[in-house]
Amino acid sequence: QVVDNDDDNKESSNPSILELRRYQLKLGYDTVPRFLDLYGQGLPSKLATLHPGTCLVTVLYSDVGRLNEVIEIWKHSGGTFAMEQSRQAARTATEWKRAIAQIANLAVEFQTTIHKPTSFSPL
């Protein structure tokens, strides 16, 4: 196996980031459960393709406050480099693409933001 030192340099120069992905879903009692079911079906194929520095931290939803919103949080230890590598790789995951195509029909809005953890963050 050949090691590409350029990739190592890219990762070490990119500190960890957290990516928050927010899905605002259509109104309805079954929208969040349908989203979570589809997401869970496609997730294993996505996880199998990810950059080694990328991991899913959590998937969240709430029954109070802003309803029908799902948030996923990803940690990219290789910074934006790892994030982009993972995004490109996920596009090759057949079950994930199938799930996202159906999830898109449930969503009314999607937003993604990138955050830098503080030096004292446990992440």
Image (cartoon, grey):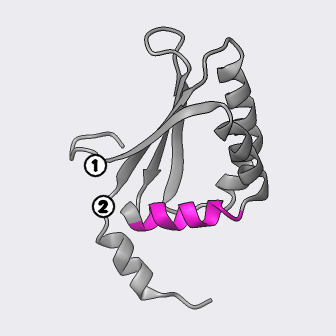
Name the N-terminal-most of marks 1 and 2: 2
- Above/below status of 40 relative to 15: above
Q: Nearer the viewer, residue 66 or 123?
A: 66
The answer, for residue 51, to whether it is visible in the render is no
In magenta segment, residue 88? yes
- Above/below status of 7 relative to 89: below
- Above/below status of 66 relative to 59: above
What is the x, y in percent for residue 77?
41, 58
Q: Amino acid at mark 2?
A: Pro
Query: Which region is colored magenta?
Result: 81-92
In magenta segment, residue 111? no
Please identify the quarter of the rendering in which residue 92 is found.
bottom right
Residue at 45% in and 15% down: 66
Q: Nearer the viewer, residue 118 or 106?
A: 106
Q: Main secondary structure of the magenta part?
A: helix
Q: Amino acid at mark 1?
A: Lys
Question: Looking at the rendering, in which quadrant would you find the C terminus?
Answer: top left
Residue at 53% in and 51% down: 55
Residue at 38% in and 47% down: 18
Q: Which residue is mark 2?
A: 15
What is the x, y in percent for residue 15?
30, 61
69 left or right of 6?
A: right
How busy is the neighbourhood of tag 1: few (under 14 within 10 Å), some, or many (20 plus)?
Answer: few
**Image mark for residue 17:** none
Badge 1 element = loop
